[in-house]
Image (cartoon, grey):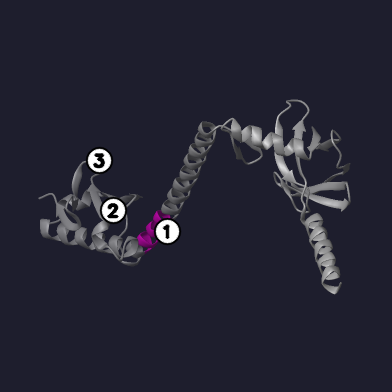
């Protein structure tokens, strides 16, 4: 008798547990397009896009979330078949229970897959994924370029400060500019009257300053180009390495 009663209690517990954890599924059908979103589980904190479902009591619920940084609350709504749910300017109808599960099975049978809030073909998802990767790569490249530009500006500032400290002014150098790892130096007219060996030593010194500022862990990565005021090359780094400096004889 005791064993029979124990089994009854265990069975009742199992029924109760099953009922507690039984989660009903539902769809949201957009009235203007008849497109279906979901299925969703009727539970607290179920995500609907960037919003969350919040059960008030039983079949009454709200949808909450931040929209443009402001916390919005939509509802309350009634969780019954065909009842309306208005989220901002969009209006939906609730489709609950077995219909929602049947809809999901039908979509899968068609070869569709759930992507975010919608059902799409694998080809559509692939296109979206490709587009998302392209956007991500573009944003990453733009960020890397910005970081590089900021570093070049900072390196140029340090380089010009060192020239000033060394007493090198417009008498010797007309202007400086940098792109990537290359520093372009426009020499003044006086440059052409100095002996070859002096010009070579100065060019080597200029490269050394730039390399130690711009790429101290890989000096040969940094390069310089020397030109006259009309753009003619008069010296700089050779193609084999930044430290291989030449000047026009």
Secondary structure mostly seen in the magenta stretch: helix
Tag of residue 173: 2
Q: Which residues are magenta?
A: 151-161
From the top left corner, tell me how far across and down residue 216 is, in percent. 31, 65
Q: Earlier in the sequence, mark 2 or mark 3?
A: 2
User: From what the image shows, is residue 220 above or below residue 68?
Assistant: below
Q: Quadrant of residue 151?
A: bottom left
Q: Quadrant of the N terminus?
A: bottom right
Which numbered disc flags the more N-terminal residue, 2 or 1?
A: 1
Instruction: Provide the secondary structure element on which disc 2 rests.
Output: strand
Q: What residue is at 52 percent from the left and 40 percent from the top?
A: 132
Q: Nearer the viewer, mark 2 or mark 1?
A: 1
Asked if residue 57 lies left or right of residue 144, the reply is right
Q: Secondary structure at mark 3?
A: loop
Position of residue 85 measured from the top left corner of the image (x, y, whole percent): 83, 37
Q: Earlier in the sequence, mark 1 or mark 3?
A: 1
Image mark for residue 154: 1
| Separation of residues labelled 2 and 3 (CA atoms) | 13 Å
Label 3: how many residues lie within 10 Å, few (<14), some (14-19) or many (20+)?
A: few
Closer-to-camera residue (151/191): 151
* Mark 3 lies on residue: 231
Q: Mark 1 vs mark 3: give the one in front.
A: 1
């Amino acid at each position: 008798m005791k064993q029979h009663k124990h089994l009854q209690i265990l069975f009742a517990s199992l029924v109760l547990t099953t009922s507690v954890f039984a989660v009903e599924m539902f769809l949201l059908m957009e009235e203007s397009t008849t497109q279906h979103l979901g299925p969703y589980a009727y539970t607290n904190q179920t995500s609907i896009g960037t919003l969350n479902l919040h059960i008030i009591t039983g079949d009454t619920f709200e949808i909450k979330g931040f929209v443009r940084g402001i916390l919005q609350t939509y509802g309350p709504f009634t969780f019954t078949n065909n009842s309306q749910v208005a989220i901002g300017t969009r209006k939906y109808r609730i489709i609950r229970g077995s219909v929602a599960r049947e809809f999901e099975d039908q979509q899968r049978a068609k070869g569709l897959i759930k992507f975010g809030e919608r059902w799409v073909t694998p080809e559509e998802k692939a296109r979206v994924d490709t587009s998302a990767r392209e956007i991500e790569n573009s944003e990453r490249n733009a960020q890397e370029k910005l970081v590089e530009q900021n570093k070049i500006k900072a390196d140029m500032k340090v380089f010009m400060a060192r020239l000033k400290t060394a007493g090198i002014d417009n008498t010797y150098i007309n202007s400086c500019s940098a792109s990537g790892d290359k520093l372009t130096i426009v020499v003044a007219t006086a440059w052409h009257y100095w002996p070859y060996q002096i010009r070579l030593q100065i060019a080597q010194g200029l490269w050394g300053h730039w390399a130690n500022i711009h790429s101290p862990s890989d000096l040969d990565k940094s390069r310089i180009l020397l030109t006259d005021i009309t753009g003619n090359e008069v010296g700089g780094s050779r193609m084999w390495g930044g430290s291989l400096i030449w000047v026009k004889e």
